[in-house]
Image (tube, rainbow, N blue to C red):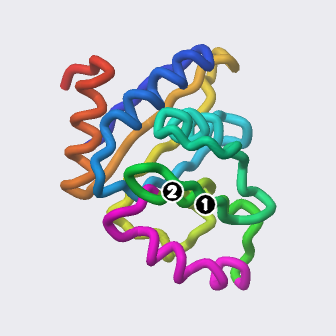
Amino acid sequence: MEFKFKTTTLLDTKYLAKAFSDTLTDDGLFVTLTGDIGAGKTQFIRYVLENLQVDKKVTSPSFVILNEYKTKRFPVYHFDLYRLEEKGLKSVVSELREYSKTGYLTFVEWAEFGQDEIPSEALKINVEYDNDDIDVRWFNFSSSDNIDNKFIENLSKKIGIKK
């Protein structure tokens, strides 16, 4: 299952993040984010965590690889695999596997660098610039897993996309 959501402003991204966080269940979710540098992956995560009332400053884990946050509902893990090479990836494989289980909200930016270590049942978000307008972003949600398909269905209903 998949759907696309177009944003033209940060308020649109904030709206999408609010709908996303409101759709989450207490089981959490494993989410991969791919897309161009500067397209809005970290900003989306920042808004989701703001809606989950994380009171700590949300930053990109580009240089530290992993940031951890606490919410009242579940722990949140935010990975950034951009700077990892094969050796570095091996150092975080156990965390990627552990935090893909129920009860965590895990975001993995630059998941394409995770090779075969990313669970196939992850909710996938690809953020891309519009070909005609640099201010437009497309958030493409997809999944091949039934649980994540249900999440996508509920999210698309929440933001008013009809299937």
Residue 76: mark in rendering: 2
Is 133 left, or right, of 34 in this rendering?
A: right
Residue drawn at x 65%, y 59% as measured from the top left? 67
Provide residue 40's location: percent of width, then percent of height. Answer: 64, 34
Which quarter of the picture shows residue 136? top right
Provide residue 126's location: percent of width, then percent of height. Answer: 51, 42
Magenta part, dominant SS: helix
Mark 2 belongs to which amino acid? Answer: Val
* Circle 1 residues within 10 Å: few <14, some 14–19, many ≥20: few
- Mark 1 or mark 2, which is nearer the start of the sequence? 1
Quarter of the picture containing the C terminus is top left
Between 47 and 139, which is closer to the camera in this rendering?
A: 47
Residue drawn at x 66%, y 64% as measured from the top left? 66
- Examine the structure image and report whether residue 95 is included in the region drawn in magenta: yes
Provide residue 42's location: percent of width, then percent of height. Answer: 64, 42
Q: Which residue is mark 1?
A: 68
108 is higher (above) or lower (below) than 92: above
Residue drawn at x 54%, y 49% as measured from the top left? 33
Whether the residues at callouts 2 and 1 have beta carbons within 8 Å, the answer is yes
Secondary element type, mark 2: strand
Residue 158: mark in rendering: none
From which residue to which does the magenta span run?
87-105
